[in-house]
Image (spheres, rainbow, N blue to C red):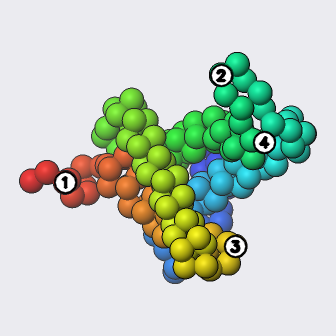
Amino acid sequence: MKKAIEYILDFFYPFFKTVMDKRTFRYAACGGMNTAFDIFLFFVFYNFVLEREILHLPFVVISPHIASFLLSFLISFPTGFLLMRYIVFQDSYLKGRVQLIRYFMSVCVSIGLNYIFLKLFVDRLHFYPTPSKLIITCIVVGFSYLSQRYFSFRTHSEPSSSH
């Protein structure tokens, strides 16, 4: 599976070579694929599994959109991690469990940034939600790339935070 993904990415990379380096291209392609996969899963869970109904659990009641988000996250989180570890940042010297913990921390911060910026842009500054989400996505993707490259999947050739 790894070789097939690398082959497909390497086939398309020459079209983007003048715009970005290979690692950045792989990050964008893998992250984009995983994001599309997450949205697809969200749609399926929301419309067909939960059928837009509230999820009643023994100790909590969860709205269908939040339950769909959580269910899709349970699947897209590991696929995102595997793509980042084995396709994008293959040369990281960190152990797998360290990468996983750091990746999880990075994803949690990204979720928090999405929430905070949405509240700021939509609730406080009264911007439209969809353009706000587009702007926020650009900010969060930039943060995510940098945190994954220099924190979650650090390599020997990149500067470390401790000197």
Q: What's the distance in space between the residues labelled 4 and 1, CA to CA?
A: 41 Å
Residue at coordinates 26% horizontally, 57% vertically from top-left?
158
Residue at coordinates 63% horizontally, 35% vertically from top-left?
74
User: In the structure shown, which secondary structural element does the residue marked by tag 1 occupy?
Assistant: loop
Q: In the rendered image, is residue 72 in sight?
A: no
User: In the structure shown, which secondary structural element does the residue marked by tag 3 occupy?
Assistant: helix
State which quarter of the image contains the N terminus: top right
Q: What's under tag 2, amino acid-wise?
A: Phe
Q: What's under tag 4, amino acid-wise?
A: Pro
Which of marks 2 and 1 precedes in the sequence?
2
On residue 130, which mark appears? 3
Instruction: Name the residue that disc number 1 marks.
Output: 161
Q: Look at discs 1 and 2 and give the one toward the viewer.
A: 2
Instruction: Name the residue that disc number 4 marks.
Output: 64
On residue 59, which mark appears? 2
Q: What's the distance in space between the residues labelled 1 and 3, CA to CA?
A: 36 Å
Q: Residues within 10 Å of mark 4 (few under 14, many from 20)?
A: many
Asked if residue 8 is positioned above or below residue 64 in the image, the reply reads: below
